Amino acid sequence: MGILRLAEGDEPWEDVPEQVRAAALRATSADALVEQMVDGDQPWPGDVRRRLLHPAGGAAATLVPLTPGAAVLDLGTGWSTLARALSTFGAEVTSADWVYARLRLETLLNDAPAGRAVHLDLGRALPWPDRTFDAVFVDTAEIRRLLGNRADADAVLSRVLAEVRRVLGDDGVAVVGTHNRLSDLPGEIRPAGRRRAGAREVRAALRSPWDDGPLRAAGLRPARVIAALPRRDAWRWMVPQERLREHLRAQLPPSSLRRRAVRAAAAAGGARWLARDYYVLARTAHDGATPRTLGEVLAGTSEQPAPVTMALSDARVAVLGSRDFVKVPLSAEQQEQVVAEVRKTHEAAGTALGAFTLEGARVEHWGAVPYAVYPLVRSRGSSDLHAARAALQGVLGEVGGGEMALLRETAFWARLVSPRGQADAAGAHAHAVRDHVLATCADARVPVGATHGDLHAGNVLLPATGGPQLVDWNRFETNNPLLLDGVFAAAEEFRAAHRATFAEALLAFVDGTMGGRTAERARALLGDLRPLEAAAVVFLDRAMTYGQPRPRYRPWTLPPLRRTGEALAARLAQPQER
């Protein structure tokens, strides 16, 4: 494994089940680890898989505009996808941790080179010379959790931060994850190992909810504060503190009592206390320049409002600037995907879907890393979910009925018969579904044309002027069954309205219990296929295109896909009437 063991002891990995720790210790490769995670005798709980493998953990890499060759230390953050994301930008990453099993998991998943993973004793001096690193990532909330109720907890934390300051270069940036102690006050349930906040801590949290007192005491100068919403292990937004009030008012429609309360608190000037977790960007020099994030470098200027960054579900982040909307890959695989998405956006502009594509999409580079840039679309003030669904119906209507063709002549079929299609079907427990479609549907005539590939309300923009626009064209194809868009859009609408699973939505379409104009339009696109066969085609398409490579980055999506495959296989096994 190449882990340098300098620790005399080991800290417990208390927040994961024993089978997770055991699998991390015995696995010999990332593939073997994921095999245990998903298909072992004791599959890992879904929330643990998400927390340990979700690409959002690597999104903090965008908080520093690292140049190729930069020396970076990931010091016991527990953000397991961070090192891989930093490496994507060309940084030379060293991972160090006080929990050996966690360090081993992270080095397996991130392909850490030998000598770049170090097991340390918590509170001991770091084994690197002064000013070694251009950036250090550390999580004070995680350190506090490991220390629990130890009498010397504050002293140990102070030593760790003093060491961070020592190994940080003069022009370097420390990215420090912190936790708002005020968020622990409501209710009695707190994460394991987290102490109840005392009166002194509450007063300190009121003065600075991002807990920068220990940083200042260690000689680190807090220069920027980024709020992580809604919580660290599943956050969606990273919002500069100076824009948090504006963001909460814009992104939280008053659809519930809690949201109305949050909006009211933000409007009254209480935004600074509302986040659970923060990233503090700190420097060693008191006269150093205020650090800019990678998002600001790529999507804004010093004269424009600091951009908001949001995590996407497949190893990339989106940066919402004042002029542009930027997608930044956090893995080598996603570099290929963002380039392909821009290319497919331009291809879609020349098809029946052209009226719904954005003009001006382009690929630019940060070092050797390509990223996608799209013009920012200002949404109309009255836009809502119902308007987005109505726009989807307009999209399906504009595309029309396409041309009739055999299913075996489509791009979907080419994927289905390929070795990759066979492997994806096997991974989704869809052997029987795939075999049925191959045996009975090849010569079915269906309406064919250009398909978006991921058509749902979340991918619809409603500009202040002009018609609706679609985003996320990475699954676009010119020669596909139109039912892929129609049935999937209807299923997603049903899921949102009824809080249903994907399996429940597809079976509702099969049984005719799914109402609405989108479902009616979808049923008009089936050609020779029965609704059950159409549902099987849509399911197989999702199984084959839902992520690249899915096993490493998206294992939490496999269980719902498998449940869908099993439900459709059971229905296909029943006697059918035409």
Image (spheres, rainbow, N blue to C red):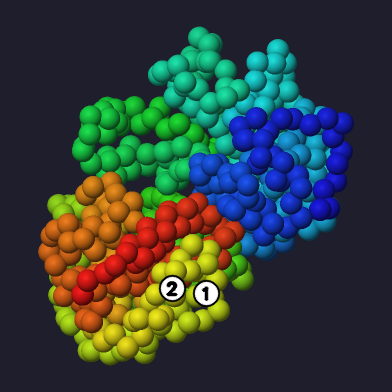
Task: Judge the density around disc 1: few (<14), some (14-19), many (≥20) Cα neighbours within 10 Å.
Answer: some
Instruction: Name the element at disc 2.
Output: helix
Name the residue: 40% across, 81% down: 439
Callout 2–callout 1 Cβ contact below 8 Å: yes
Name the residue: 57% across, 28% down: 212
Q: Residue 492 is drawn in which quadrant?
A: bottom left
On the rendered structure, is 146 left or right of 410? Answer: right
Name the residue: 68% across, 23% down: 147
On the rendered structure, is 362 left or right of 31? Answer: left
On the rendered structure, is 136 left or right of 361? Answer: right
Foreground pick, 189 / 473: 189
Q: Residue 74 is drawn in which quadrant?
A: top right
Instruction: Name the element at disc 1.
Output: helix
Q: Residue 235 is drawn in which quadrant?
A: top left
Residue underneath mark 2: 434
- Where is residue 23 drawn, in percent x and y? 70, 45
Say what amino acid the circle numbered 2 marks.
Arg
Work out how far the residue at label 2 is from the one at label 1, CA to CA, in angstroms: 8 Å
Foreground pick, 317 / 224: 317
- Where is residue 47 drawn, in percent x and y? 50, 41
On the rendered structure, is 225 left or right of 92? Answer: left
Q: Residue furthest front?
A: 575
Can you say whether 448 is above or below 297 in the image? below
Task: Judge the density around disc 2: few (<14), some (14-19), many (≥20) Cα neighbours within 10 Å.
Answer: many
Looking at the rendered structure, which numbered label has been put on residue 422? 1
| Whether residue 567 is visible | yes
- Where is residue 121 drawn, in percent x and y? 80, 32
Of the numbered discs 2 and 1, the one sitting upstream in the chain is 1
Can you say whether 119 is above or below 511 in the image? above
